[in-house]
Image (cartoon, grey):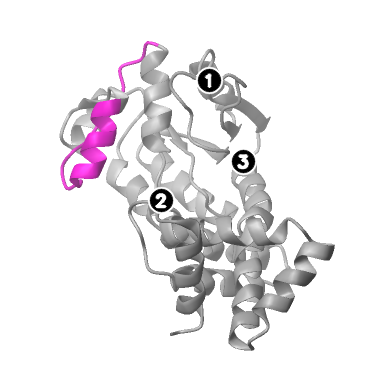
Amino acid sequence: MGAGIGAALVRAGYRVTWASAGRRQPSARRAQTAGLVDVESVEAIRRESDLVVSVCPPHAALDVAKRICGFSGLYLDANAIAPATAGEVAGVIESGGGSYVDGAIIGSPPQIPPPASGQGPRLYLSGPRAAEVRQVFRGTPVEAIVVSAARTSASALKMSYAAWSKGSAALLLSARALAVSQGVEEPLLAEWERSQPDLDGRSIRAGQQASMKGWRWVGEMEEIAKAYRSAGLPDGFHRAAAEVFSRPVRYEEAVPDDATLATVLEALLGR
């Protein structure tokens, strides 16, 4: 997603930098393909940039903010974090003289050139300076939408959205794993075919996503649970979803759907 956002901004005429220090070769390949300029260090990014965009696994959002602390420009945190965590990130950035803008990305990474449908991801923004960030993304495949002037509204929206979109994937995988453990997978699939015909395909897709992205979704589920607790809502389901996504073996590349699902179900059952 980060490389895709960067490529969209490069195409819009911006100079977009990244820091290669400590990063792996796949990251370097993505940055090169996106047309990003390597300034090697985070210190150089802090010194040379007007806008910093943080797109990382949720568990790393606060650490990234601490590394960039001292940056005096606009800092967009576009990570899937709870409003309370977003408030912590904002505090770090503002203590160093920067201005915080809250962000939430919903959708797949932007494609260059854009697909025929014209559909790209939505970047929801909030905070007093959100409109300035929206202006940066004008004319790109990223549709930037200001939610409100409230400091963490965009993160609240992301938590509400992902609570269902990814939480339901964890529930579906665990339901199918239960059927496997009890020897009733075939009759379950037959009943799904009759009454819920989309669930078989959805469970296959959920298995592939869990194997490739589940390691990143663990932190997201934990952030959703944190948001639920803050709102006085039961948080147990999303804590369980975090455990579901922590179990599959991580694959760097796509593997056949059927093989992926079988492997994921076995991992959930501890086999």
Q: Amino acid at mark 1?
A: Glu
- The residue wearing badge 3 is 154
**Residue that lies at the very extreme toward the right in this rendered image:** 195
Whichever of labels 1 and 3 marks the residue nearer the N terminus, that label is 1
| Labelled disc at residue 132 | 1
Q: Earlier in the sequence, mark 2 or mark 3?
A: 2
Quadrant of the frame with the C terminus: bottom left
Task: Report the residue marked by disc 2.
Answer: 61
Residue placed at 52% from the left, 62% from the top?
207
Q: Residue at x 32, y 33 (%)?
A: 71
Q: Position of residue 103 (x, y in %)?
A: 54, 38
- Amino acid at pointer 3: Ala
Please name whichever residue, 164 or 80, is drawn nearer the observer in this view of the structure: 164
Task: Give the total number of marks visible in the rendering.
Answer: 3
Q: Which residue type does callout 2 highlight? A: Ala
Q: Is residue 26 one of those drawn in magenta?
A: yes
Front label number (1 vs 3): 3
SS of the residue under disc 3: helix
Which residue shows up at 40% across the image and 41% down it?
A: 93
Q: Outermost residue, bottom direction?
A: 182
Q: Residues within 10 Å of mark 1 (few under 14, many from 20)?
A: few
Instruction: Name the element at disc 2.
Output: helix
The magenta stretch is 13-33
The correct choice, above or below, for 175 with respect to 52 in the image is below
**Is tag 2's residue or tag 1's residue first in the polypeptide sequence?**
2
Give the numbered dot on residue 192.
none
